Each structure stands twice: as C-alpha cells, then as structure tokens.
Amino acid sequence: MRVVVTGGAGFVGSHLCEALLGRGDDVVCVDNLSTGSAENIAALRDQRGFTFVHADVSTGLEVPGRVDAVAHLASPASPADYQRLPLQTLAVGSRGTEHALDLARRHEARFVLASTSEVYGDPRIHPQPEEYWGHVNPVGPRSVYDEAKRYAEAVTAAYARHAGTNAGIVRIFNTYGPRLRPHDGRVVSSFIRQALAGEPLTLFGDGQQTRSFCFVDDLVRGIVAMLDSREPGPVNLGNPDERTVAELAGLVLHITGSSSSVRNLPLPTDDPVRRCPVIDRALERLAWKPETGLEEGLRATVSWFRSRPAQPLAAVGP
Ligand code: NAD
C-alpha cells in the first residue's frame, strides 16, 4: 500500500510510519512540525519508500501519485499544546479533516481518523463503550480539542454515508511510550521527566482520578488493523487496565528509583475524573487487544527518556 500519514512526525504518527514501512508499505508523511519534530522521523528519512512533505493540512492536501490509504493523525494532542494552539487545533480538526477526507475520496482510498477518548468528555458512564455520546462542555478550556474531534467524527461519518468513502474512526485513549516529549504536559511524560530530574512529581487533585494507559506499539497495531479493514467504527483503542494517577506516580518512582516527592496541585477545569475504554468492539471486529503491561511499557519509556542526549538524567536512579 501507499499510505499518507498526516501528523506522521508526531509521537504516534512516527511509530505508525515506522510500522508501515517495516511491513513493506510506502509512506508519505505530511506534517507541519508544529508539535512533532524532524528528530522523530530522522531514522526513517533514508528508508526506501518514505517521503516527507512539510505542509499544513488545514490549508489543503495534495499528494502526487497513487494513494491507497490515508491515516489522519495531524492535530495538537496534549492539553498544553491545544491550549497554546487553540485556533490551529480547531482548524486541523475541521478543515484539515475535510482535506484529508477529500484526498481519500479522490483516490478511492481507505481513510482512518485518529479521534480521541476526549469525545466522551467527563463521562457519566463508566467504562466508556462506543455507543456513549459523551458529556462535553462546548465552551470549556478543552473544547477546542474535544469539539474539533467531534466535528472530525461527524464529517468522517458524512463522507462515508454520502460520498461512499471507505472511512473509519478510532477513538484513542491515553497512550505513552518512547518519543513522548518530556515537556508536553501529559501525565506520563511529566512524571518520568520529574522523577529522573529529582523534582517533585506534580499530582493534580488527590490523584484518585483514573486513566488507562496504552503502550504506543499496541496502539499502532490497532491503527494498522483499522487501516487494513473496512470497519467504519468508531472503535475504542486503549488499554482497559485502569489506574489512579497516584498509582502511576508510585510506579514511575519505583521504576526510576527516584526519591522525588509528590506535590499536590488543584485539579484543572473539566479534567475528567475517570477514563477507561470498553474494547469489546476492537476485539470482535479487528481481533485487537493490548499486550504490553503498564510496568513493561513504562520501563521502555523510561529507558528512552534516559537515552536522550539532551537530558542530563542518566545519573539518577538505579
Ligand atoms: P503529536 O502532537 O505528537 O502529533 C501530532 C502531529 O500532527 C505533530 O507531528 C504535529 O506537528 C502534526 N500537526 C498538527 N497540526 C498539523 C497541521 N495543521 N498540518 C500538518 N501537521 C500537523 O500528538 P500524538 O500524541 O502523536 O497524537 C496523534 C493523534 O492521535 C492526534 O490526532 C491525537 O488527537 C490522537 N490521540 C492521541 C492520544 C495520545 O494519548 N497520544 C490520545 C488520543 C488521541
């Protein structure tokens, strides 16, 4: 296949490009490097079948040559990023998604939208099945992301329904792994960075809010299975192993061997209290389930953080 990956220089996108190249697909990575980096795809740039296009998909998306599939991942994804780039987040979720869908429609290609568990908002149903419509504040601080993704889902469903596009939606839950940016404000990257630097771990609220953390290799397997299928979704992709954020902090301290303290800070507005996917649909329709345990995935992530040359972190921990 020749697959266009928008947002391919980001955290998830770069792993997806790598997995597709690894099985022999050609990959056209389209990215404006707003939250991704050239470093993420440095190892791919010399590989046969890999092309990088530096472009903003919100302004248009033209790819010369054959296109068999489009994986649309372009979007700021961490709260710190989308609050710094609110209008760009809305633009890429709306116009960017339309451009990516239009590319797929013109080429009669498979299209997969990377949506998010954030479409469930602060859920009133727990754990969250795909049938749940969500509980989202349309004017809250997270709405630029939540509502952009909800629109992205609506326009994807409309292309499938009215234009006959072979389109599908995956709803991604918290994912972590190598190439998370240390300062992206996400809980796993923040805890690991702080633990390795010997700084206090910043815990919002009492830490009893839950998240379910999926290792990036597992997620990418799910996205590839979705690309290979004709499944419209939406399909939740996440790890149902629900943990409190306080538990995650303890695990990071244990794995890094850090003696950092934990500092409690007020819970941000509209921060969801519980988040955990029902993944029966992914199992039934894509034969997918996560395979990497949290401790194993965290160890791989910590060793990647330690290996980064810019960080004087190696001296901390066992
Ligand atoms: P990321 O910020 O690392 O990657 C996003 C990529 O999109 C970056 O490389 C960025 O430069 C690029 N991009 C942003 N706007 C663009 C534009 N207008 N034109 C071209 N490129 C643009 O984030 P990520 O964690 O890799 O997330 C990838 C996708 O998965 C996003 O759509 C996100 O919403 C979704 N997702 C991720 C998670 C997670 O836990 N990582 C959870 C739910 C959903």
Image: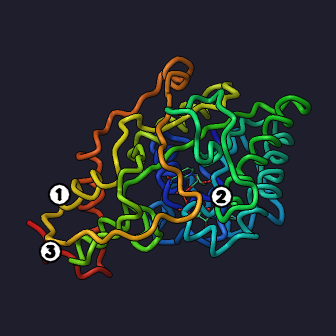
Pointer 3 or 1: first along the chain: 1
Q: How many labels does the image show?
A: 3
Q: Is mark 3 within 8 Å of ligand 1?
A: no
Q: For this view, does 171 lie left or right of residue 200?
A: right
Residue type at mark 1 is Ile
Under tag 1, what secondary structure? helix
Q: Is mark 2 within 8 Å of ligand 1?
A: yes
Near-viewer residue (35 or 184): 184
Is residue 262 positioned above or below 107 on the image? below
Near-viewer residue (83 or 183): 83
Q: Residue at 29% of width from left, 53% of height from top?
A: 248
Q: Is mark 1 within 8 Å of ligand 1?
A: no
Q: Position of residue 190 (x, y in %)?
A: 37, 68
Pointer 2 or 1: first along the chain: 2
Quarter of the image for residue 260 reads: bottom left
Residue hosting label 2: 74
Residue hosting label 3: 316
Q: Give the CA distance from mark 2 to mark 3.
A: 35 Å
